[in-house]
Image: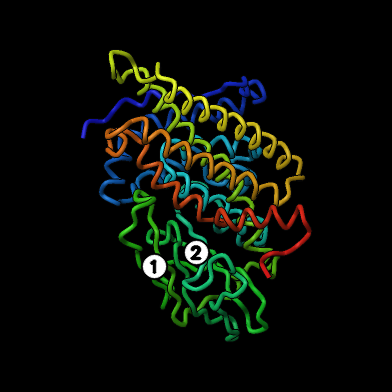
Amino acid sequence: MAVRADLFESPDHYQLDELLSEEHLMVRNAVRDYVKKEISPIIEDYAQRAEFPIQIVKQLGDLGVFGPTVPTEYGGGGLDYISYGLMMQELERGDSGVRSTASVQGSLVMFPIYAYGNEAQKKKYLPKLASGEWLGCFGLTEPDHGSNPSGMLTNIKDAGDHVILNGAKMWISNSPFADIAVVWAKNEEGKIQGIIVERGMEGFTTPTTHGKWSLRASATGELVFDNVKVPKENILPNVIGLKGPLGCLSKARYGIAWGALGAAMDCYDTALRYSKERIQFDKPIGAFQLQQKKLAEMVTEITKAQLMVWRLGVLMNEGRATPAQISMAKRNSCEIATNIARAARQMLGGMGITGEYSVMRHMMNLESVITYEGTHDIHLLITGMEITGFNAFK
């Protein structure tokens, strides 16, 4: 398949770039250039073959997208949350699976070790994760406990200087290639704790999930624990209960709010270009009212979402963003991106289902993005609970 040149230009209908600092623009442009050079030329082929481009892990480490908000003393970038958001936007503009790799590494593996770990754990793991030497994954979801993680069955039992870990996790991004896993399990008192499980520990396996129609260029698998002996020094000491994993999910959802917007922008940009090139009835299809309506609605939703995630980034930087605010932005970006991908696919006609354009791949990927880190419906209920005061989950 011939590779089409990546001519992406970011829509900015309200001059929102003026809200960004020089550092923000520099960070965004560096990741955009990387995606154009290293991701766009290969990603369709990897997606068609349902294969993860493992070589990008080191590249992403070199680029600085793993744990960019983690302090530099632990190998992170020491950047703010708007920089992090822009990185995720640009990576997902290339492919949701590539952004997933970075999101998991930064928000779900490095963040809990940084926030809940001790000094020895931070020094041991964070620099290798930041550089891409090690790849990590996050074990929360179980075969029978997705939206209700508090019902988890995975457990640890005290055995002297170590614990015995049993259970299983599924739908785990990065698991087939991960060197470490941050796993959430119940102790003998029924309280949830985080524990770092390392590749090579006896009884720890990571079967690959096959047959996906979505996130095909991302590695997904299971985590299976069969009497795994884990040293007690691998337990994250500074958090107990569900607030541990939920704190990680807030960070990841924030990245997705920006990331899904990147996918939406790519679909819009593709449809806009195509509408100027494709001739029907003796004129470009972009000259027809119905096509202009689709494009106008796309750019309007993108502009609203850009304002939302920028404001959320300001609140994150100030330490004022609430989990419910992050939840709203994640749901909104996923919804508009899914709708924009679908409309763009229709505008491209038959070409929209081929790998010659990115739209169908985004459309399939977004079906996962709208589901993971809290489904569309769960996020609606989080907002509903905040505005009414009534808990619809019970």
Residue 175 versus residue 281 in the image, above or below: below
Q: Nearer the viewer, residue 93 or 13?
A: 13
- Residue pictured at 27% horizontal, 46% vertical: 48
Question: Residue 189 sits in which quadrant?
Answer: bottom right
Tell me the distance, in whole angstroms, between the alpha carbons under discs 1 and 2: 10 Å
Which of the two discs, 1 and 2, labels the residue nearer the N terminus?
Answer: 2
Identify the image's colour scheme: rainbow, by chain, secondary structure or one colour.
Answer: rainbow
- Under circle 1, the secondary element is loop
For residue 159, the mark is none
Q: Which residue is mark 1?
A: 206
Q: Is residue 98 left or right of residue 161?
A: left
- Residue pictured at 42% horizontal, 61% vertical: 175
Residue 393 versus residue 48 in the image, above or below: below
Residue 322, position in %: x, y? 73, 50
Q: Residue furthest left?
A: 1
Q: Quadrant of the N terminus?
A: top left
